[in-house]
Amino acid sequence: MANCSILLIIDDYKERLEISNSLENQGFKIDTAGSETSAFEKLKSDSYDLLVVDYNSSQINTLRIFEYVKEIKEDIKFVIIADDCNAEAAVKYMKDGAFDFLMKPLSKGTLESIIARVIAGKKEAQEKKQNKLYQKYKIVTNNKQLLKLLELAKRIANSKAPVLIQGESGTGKELFARYIHQHSPRANKNLVALNCAALPDGLLESELFGHEKGAFTGAITRKIGKFELANESSILLDEISEMNLYLQAKLLRVLQESEIDRVGGINPVPIDVRVIATTNRDLDISIKENKFRSDLFYRLNVIPLKILSLRERKDDIAVLSKYFIKKYNKIDKRNVKGITNEALDVLISMPWPGNVRELENIIERSLLLCDGNMIEKKDIFVGEEHKIPVTKPDTFEPPAGTIREMERKMIFHTLEKTNGNRTHAADLLGISVRTLRNKLNEYRQTMEVP
């Protein structure tokens, strides 16, 4: 029952000390504040499960603290203690969300009962949250190799060792990262995720490690980085292969020393973070091209996981289709019962460059186009341009033009099909958003934009 952090906001020193000593003797983590200023400073810098606030204090505005907690720290349970019975105030606070309104003096049994209720509620909320996350990030498979990989992921979840997850875009690397976190002792805290390809290098350093006030132009306040936010939890570094060599060196130090340096900071900040990294690239090639540090690769690759592409696990297409039909029936308020064997055969014959993400998109679209209770072959494609190309190997003729020209045409064709959505286009092309952005800038500079 000792897993509870409590802040006592009471201005009377003797009373505050008596309650604090009583709770500390029972193993609870106790912090105290004797003024409103001190209370706000502690609330802004630390995390608590329960606040015990003195209603009759001359130094503390109970209502102001209560409103702040409701707006900013809504997970904290708020208990008010008062010298005399103020029925009107008690009713008002309880209606507005206070956990309890108690009369002084507080007995040991009353405090224990309050804390027990707080811990029970916290446990129930955590279980509901975990169940919700499990449903949202559920990994659906009947494939034997993938089931073995899931078992391995579950076995290594208890360790703090870094994990490197490799696989093509759309295979479910983030789902595996969340699966590991959810089965780890850190599951009671949120997984912190960052896409390394989504930010320029300068901003990425600040996002990862934070910065001090005045560290650079525009740094008007201190910023806490993702690593500090992930303290005692896990951090997901998505598309880590897009991180530049300078930041790779800083990350290597974090893994070795368990501390980070804020941009513009003087002293290192100790952290306890489990690193899970993902990439859709072949890092052996990146190392040979001097784009990825070999020492960082070996440090991250303590527990390597390679996710199969959908074309390597086509036995999962049927079960995944069923899962996505059920999912989008609920989201789009449809009542489609399933998919015909003919339509399923079409899906199985496809090459799936976009992997599971592409299958999910096609199932959602097919469900919306379906005018019966089963998805049929005609529902899978819209127009002739979506038919599956069939090319016999002995009649294949290479397309005209250079590789650069073919690459440019493929990029703009994919952008056209995704209505200019660069993230979706990059996924379908099997490249990062940053690589796509660099290619487009290159085409503009050489006037190769159609």
Image: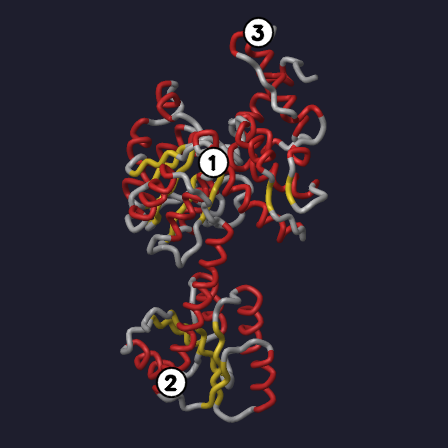
Mark 3 or mark 1: whose residue is earlier in sequence: 1
| Amino acid on which disc 3 is placed | Glu
Q: What's the distance in space between the residues labelled 3 and 2, CA to CA?
A: 88 Å
Q: Residue under circle 3?
A: 397
Contact? badges 3 and 2 (CB < 8 Å): no
Which residue is labeled 1 in the image?
171
**Foreground residue, 307 or 211?**
307
User: Residue at coordinates 52% horizontally, 8% vertically from top-left?
Assistant: 394
Looking at the image, residue 136 lies above or below residue 361: below
The residue at which mark 2 appears reads as 15
Residue 191 location, x and y as percent? 43, 50
Disc 1: CA contacts within 10 A as few (<14), some (14-19) or many (>=20): many
Q: Quadrant of residue 275?
A: top left
In this view, the mark in front (3 or 2) = 3
CA neighbours of label 2 inside 10 A, class few (<14), some (14 to 19), many (20+): few
Circle 2: residue type? Glu
Which percent across, then down, holds residue 286?
39, 23
First in sequence: mark 3 vs mark 2: 2
Residue farthest along the front direction in this orientation: 341
Q: Residue at x 70, y 31 (%)?
A: 382
Q: Give the Cα distance between marks 1 and 2.
A: 59 Å
Q: Tag 3's secondary structure?
A: loop
Q: Locate the C terminus and report the quarter of the image it occupies.
A: top right
Label 1 residue SS: loop
Colour setup of the view: secondary structure
At label 1, which amino acid type do we have? Thr
Mark 1 touching mark 2, by CB under 8 A? no
Q: Nearer the viewer, mark 1 or mark 2?
A: 1
Q: Could you tell me which quadrant the N terminus lies in?
A: bottom left
In front: label 3 or label 1? 3
